[in-house]
Structures are given as structure tokens and as C-alpha cells.
Image: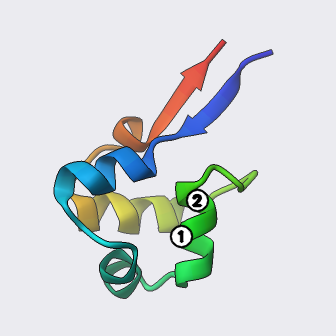
Amino acid sequence: MGQIILRLDRVMADRKISLNELSDKVGVSNVNLSKMKNGKISAIRFSTLEAICDALDCQPGDILEYKK
């Protein structure tokens, strides 16, 4: 079975945005964003994903990757 890999760190680096700045824009705590950035979560709300994509001007596929 495959797995979903979060590429939030890569997208943040491409956009030159810090964890604190993204946290302020999205309204999600630094701790939760840090867990997301490090792939330490098992679920993400669509509303959170939408807010992240809006703040980073990206698509969900830029952040999420499926690996077999």
C-alpha cells in the first residue's frame, strides 16, 4: 500500500515563507504546521488545506504526493 507524503516544506521554501508567517496567514498554530511540515500528521481538514493553498498560491497536488 502506498503513502501520502507532505511536501509543505518544499513549497514553503520555494515561496520563501516562514512557519510563523504561514501560521499567521492560515490561522493554524505553529505546532500543527510544524507537524504538517515534518509529515507527522495522519489527516488534514479540507478547510486547512484550502487556507494553505490560498496563502502559498498553490494547488493541493503541490503539497501532497502519493508514493507507492
Residue 20 shows in the view: yes
The type of residue carrying mark 2 is Met
Closer to the camera, 37 or 42?
37
Q: Which residue is mark 2?
A: 36
Does 20 appear above or below 8? below
Residue 45 shows in the view: no
Q: Residue at x 39, y 35 (%)?
A: 61
Secondary structure found at label 2:
helix
Q: Which residue is mark 1?
A: 33
Does 30 appear above or below 52? below
The type of residue carrying mark 1 is Leu
Q: Real-space Cα distance between discs 2 and 1?
A: 5 Å
Does 12 appear above or below 6? below
* Image quadrant in which the C terminus is located: top right
* Image quadrant in which the N terminus is located: top right
Secondary structure found at label 1:
helix
Q: Residue at x 31, y 48 (%)?
A: 11
